[in-house]
Each structure stands twice: as structure tokens, then as C-alpha cells.
Amino acid sequence: HEDLQEFLLVIKQGADRLTQLVEDLLFLVRLDTGRVAEEFRLLACVRHDLDAILRRTVQQYEEQAMACGVMLETRLDSNLPPVWLCEPLFVDALGRLVDNGIKFSKEKGKRVTVSAQATGDWVEVAVSDQGVGIPAEEIPHLFQHFRQIDRDKMEQQGVGLGLAIAQELIYLHSGEITVKSKPGVGSIFTIRLPLAGDRQSVPPWLD
């Protein structure tokens, strides 16, 4: 009976990975053809309370983190300034970083932290983990399509599209993603977004 349950779980996990792969490939086509950019320009002209969005996004991954024995936490500066966002696309990008952090920190007691602070004309949202880390020679290629790290050494989900898609989504927001990492210590992925300014301002992609 236990063997059957384990077998069914493996089948379900495989089906989930295949579904995610198909969804990512279809989304990549929409990105490459400019359809996502068109939708973005229609939806993104909204000032958002970033604090609330970050907390809601992290909450979506708490069950996954708990199942992996990973501690998921937030460290957000008080009174974060508003930013221009298309919320679904930003949440998609951030969620991919959180998901990666959890997957590569699969060890009891490890932490994944989502932090945010205002720096000059930007808000920086960082996802830090205590996972396996990334070799320095791999970092310049990290956001390429279908890029994976040490596939033969670790279990890895998907086919290497998650970070590439996340980067494209943040680029749409006139932002950027950077990464710092040390093998055996962990990684920090940082999203930088321009501030929304006063209520009479317009998003940078419409200026």
C-alpha cells in the first residue's frame, strides 16, 4: 500500500513538472512575440503597496517550504514607497525566485528570506537562500533559456526556463535582476524596481 502511494506520488510530481513545462514554453512564446508586453502596457499603470504584495506572495509558498523543512521568512522595511506594477506578472517573477530558493535549500533548518528596502530611486527586493550556491563561472549564463546548474549532481525541476522568464518580466517593469552566490553558502537574487514617484507621475515605460 505504501509502495503504491509512493508510486502515485511520483506520477503526480512528473505530471506537475510536465504541466509547468508546457505552461512555461507557451508563456515564453508569448514573451518572444510581444504579446505579454502588450498586455503589460495595458495592465501595469497602477501604483502598488509592495509590502502587501510581498507578504501575500510569500504566504503562497509557506506550505511548500514547510514540506521541505525550510524556514520561509520576510524582512521588509517599514513604509516601503509605492512602485508601478502589473501585479500578476511581478508575483510570477518573484514566485519563481522563491520557488528556486526553496528547492535548492532542501535541508531542515535552512532559511529562505524575502527582504525589501528603498535605495535611492529604487526599491530592492531580495530573495536569499542557504542552498547549494552557484559556481562563479555559471552566473553570467544563469538567465539563458534552458540553462541548468549541475544537472547531473542534483535533482532539479523544469528545464531551465524559470529564471529567464523572471528576468524578462522584471525587464518589462523597467527593472533588473542581479545575483550574488557562493557555492556551499547560498544565493541572493535581487530585483530592483523604480519608485512610482508622486501621484502625478507616470510609469517609466510610458514617459
Image: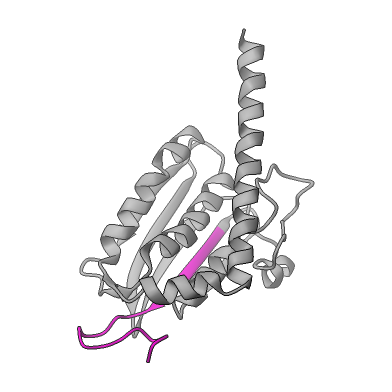
Residue drawn where x is 72% and y is 56% of the image: 149
**Quadrant where the C terminus is found in the figure:** bottom left
| Residue extending furthest toward the top | 1
Q: Is residue 62 left or right of residue 101?
A: left
| Residue extending furthest toward the bottom | 207
Inspect this view and state whether residue 178 appears.
no
Label the magenta part by its dominant secondary structure: loop
Q: Within the image, what quadrant is residue 42 found in?
A: bottom left
Q: How many labels does the image show?
A: 0
Q: In this view, does 33 lie to the left or right of 204?
A: right
- What segment is highlighted magenta in the picture? 187-207
Residue drawn where x is 56% and y is 40% of the image: 106
**Quadrant where the N terminus is found in the figure:** top right
Q: Where is residue 63 in the image (x, y as percent from the top left)?
A: 42, 37
Q: Is residue 24 left or right of residue 138?
A: left
Inspect this view and state whether residue 199 appears.
yes
Q: Position of residue 16 (x, y in %)?
A: 60, 38
Q: Position of residue 92 (x, y in %)?
A: 47, 58
Residue drawn where x is 64% and y is 65% of the image: 29
Above/below status of 111 relative to 137 = above
